[in-house]
Amino acid sequence: MSELAREVNNVQNPALGAFLIWSFVKGYNQSHASKGFPPLQLLFLVLPIVLHRQTYELLKSTQTTSGLKTFSGKFSKSSISQRDVLVSLQPRIILWRNLSWASIQIALANNLIVLELEGTVLPISQDMPKPKILSPIKNLVRESEKLGVWCGQLSLSEIGILLHIQF
């Protein structure tokens, strides 16, 4: 296996994805006005945003208090001009859906999340698992939670409009 293939496998693996999805669900729940839980379809946003270098960098550079509107607005700033990255999010969600689904299945199987009959997803615990987590992964977890916080403050249609995606 080449070095590049090994790196891709290290980052784009369902176990890491499960942890990031749990973090997103936790953030969503904490910020939702009525402590609601995200619908299943929102979970398919997490990995294509957090594990994609260009979207991750803008996610990381946006304060939690700024919100999804500020994040999506950064893609069209003239100094950055990365509108194509935002427009390519919908195809990336489709391309990564197998990885996202495998991650959701691992999160369910390992009791990180629960899928309710009406299609919402609950975090089993609000606490981070105990094993020592490396800094790069902690950063990914923090950004996943931030994305969850932002999505918890908006409706599905608002999220779709801001991110130029369809559910």
Image (cartoon, helix red, strand yellow):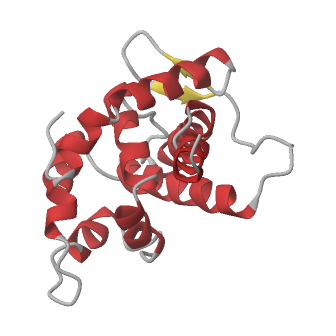
Q: Locate the N terminus by quadrant.
A: top right
Q: Specify the quadrant of the image occupied by residue 106.
A: top right
Q: Specify the quadrant of the image occupied by residue 111.
A: top right
The residue located at (40%, 56%) in the rendering is 52
Residue 132 shown left or right of residue 105 in the figure: right
Residue 77 shown left or right of residue 120 in the figure: left
Q: Locate the C terminus by quadrant.
A: top left
Residue 86 locus on image (x, y percent): 20, 60
Q: Residue furthest bottom?
A: 79
Residue 93 locus on image (x, y percent): 28, 39
Residue 80 locus on image (x, y percent): 23, 83
Q: Residue furthest front?
A: 2
Residue 38 shown left or right of residue 103 in the figure: left
Q: How many marks?
A: 0
Task: Check the image and report above or below for 145 versus 102.
Answer: below
The residue located at (53%, 52%) in the rendering is 4
Q: Residue furthest top?
A: 117
The residue located at (48%, 26%) in the rendering is 121
Task: Check the image and report above or below for 57 versus 4.
Answer: below
The foreground one among 21 and 11 is: 11
Task: Check the image and report above or below for 47 versus 164.
Answer: above
Q: Specify the quadrant of the image occupied by residue 113.
A: top right
Task: Check the image and report above or below for 163 versus 160.
Answer: below
The residue located at (79%, 52%) in the rendering is 133
The foreground one among 72 and 101 is: 101
Residue 136 locus on image (x, y percent): 66, 62
